[in-house]
Amino acid sequence: MDQAATLRKRMEQRFSQTLPLSHKKAKTIAVMSGKGGVGKSNLSLNMALALIEKGKKVLLIDLDVGMGNIDILIGHQSIYTMMDVLNQKMPFHRVLSTGPKGIQYISGGTGLNTMFELSKEKWRFFLEELSAVLKDYDFVILDMGAGLSKDQLPFALSADEILIVTTPEPTSIMDAYSAIKHLALNGQELKLKVIVNRCTNQKDGISTFSRLSHTVNSFLQQELVYAGPIPEDSSVSKAVVEQQPFLLKNPRSKLSRSVYLLADSLLKTNKQKVEDKPTFIEKLSSFLRRGNPT
């Protein structure tokens, strides 16, 4: 038993020493919500398109395994998915799909219940591929699954920034609080920003954020930043039915303008990024070495 434990420890040390780590400027943004149906994936997609229109190279990764809908929103069926990288050790460049405006994305796929039950060999391959691909992008947007499962938590905690999507509905606010609590219990120095989707007006967004921020600050001692409101717009459902991003369907609408403003704020914070902090890959690989948080 002692010999087996010693061998395992040596293998883990060898893993951590030989893993090539990316130090590229690519900023990772985890977009999450406390529950489904708040428009998280739609915002992730259109935010990525807004950044592309501003001259940035963006990779959108659908981590909502089994429930991902980026393909549906774009109207394109990917041949390969993230599951092919994790299960079949398929290189990232083979699973990349291209959508409107040349956006590159990786579909979530189905067929894997617990990501962290994969072997270290497969995880090492995944991290090496991800590290290599980060060098080619300015932004990597991670569309997380609703509720933040234990398998997705390391990705969120490793991201440079976390965007939490909620709506003015009381149940949505409480679900967002629960997700933030889960993050706060497992992470330190988290950069949490809140987007209030489906607002009837500016006051609606500010009021929703204030309620959530007050609760989080009182019980979790965690500061939140208001990323801004996204207005309620009937054109969203029409765009989903037509499988066309609303930013491209109605680029001058109030809805689209709010997403462009969100993209501008991300560009500003990207310039302020501190380079001496651990990278996304370094943090994610540390979760693998010490085990998944609960």
Image (spheres, helix red, strand yellow):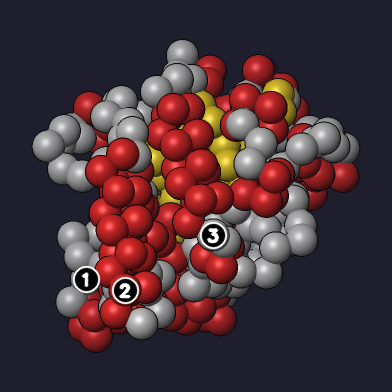
Disc nearest the viewer among 3 and 1: 3
In the rendered structure, which amino acid carries the disc numbered 3? Ser
In the picture, the quarter occupied by the C terminus is bottom left
Q: Position of residue 148 (x, y in %)?
A: 51, 69
Observer-nearest of 224 and 94: 94
- Circle 3: element type: loop
At horizontal 27% and vertical 29% (from top left) the residue drawn is 23
Quadrant housing the N terminus: bottom left
Which residue is under mark 2? 3
* Residue 199 visible within the image: no
| Nearest to the observer: residue 50 or residue 186 | 186
Instruction: Give the crowd class for mark 1: few <14, some 14-19, many >=20 residues within 10 Å.
Output: some
The residue that label 3 is drawn on is: 119
Going by the image, does 118 lie left or right of 31?
right
Q: Amino acid at mark 2?
A: Gln
Does the CB distance between marks 2 and 1 fall below 8 Å? no
Task: Kindly identify the residue that appears in the image at 66 percent across and 36 percent down.
Answer: 90
Determine whether label 3 and label 1 are within 8 Å by CB. Answer: no
